[in-house]
Amino acid sequence: MSGNFTPEQLRETVEKLFRDAGYALPELLAEIELLSEQNEKLKQELKKLRLSSTRSASAGDKMNSRLKDALRE
């Protein structure tokens, strides 16, 4: 199994395994859903932090160029 499954694909695969085995474990499906939600939250947080990091880095560059310009004069 590779790590490129969507939550829907995982759910379908687990449900197929349940049918093939003849029993189900609903807690596993709930755990997949929980992990999927956590993953989405972490992706959004990472995106926000990267954007914030980019903004603060560009602001620092502007300040450095202003300081350099002032020192040149």
Image (cartoon, grey):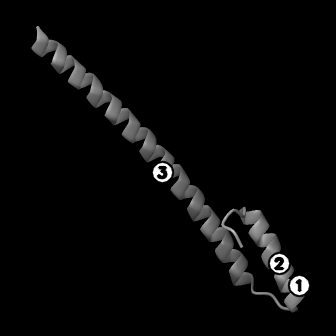
- Amino acid marked by disc 1: Arg
Residue 70 location (% of width, % of height): 13, 13
N-terminal-most mark, 3 or 1: 1
Residues tagged 3 and 1 counted as in contact (Cβ below 8 A): no
Pick the residue in front: 26 or 39: 39
Residues tagged 2 and 1 counted as in contact (Cβ below 8 A): yes
Residue 32 location (% of width, % of height): 67, 72
Q: Quadrant of residue 41?
A: bottom right
Pick the residue in front: 34 or 58: 58
| Residue pointed to by mark 1 | 19
Residue at x-position 23% and y-position 24%: 63
Q: In the structure shown, which secondary structural element does the residue marked by tag 2 occupy? A: helix
- Amino acid marked by disc 2: Glu
| Residue pointed to by mark 3 | 46
Report crowding for label 1: few under 14, some 14 to 19, many 20 or more residues within 10 A (C-alpha).
few
Structural distance between the alpha carbons of marks 2 and 3: 31 Å
Residue at x-position 72% and y-position 73%: 1
N-terminal-most mark, 2 or 3: 2
Residue 35 location (% of width, % of height): 61, 69
Is 71 placed left or right of 44 in the picture?
A: left
Q: In the structure shown, which secondary structural element does the residue marked by tag 1 occupy? A: helix
Residue at x-position 89% and y-position 87%: 20
Residue 10 location (% of width, % of height): 75, 70
Residue at x-position 61% and y-position 62%: 37
| Residue pointed to by mark 2 | 15
Q: Is residue 72 above or below residue 64?
A: above
Q: Is residue 65 above or below residue 29?
A: above
Structural distance between the alpha carbons of marks 2 and 1: 6 Å
- Amino acid marked by disc 3: Leu
Pick the residue in front: 43 or 30: 43
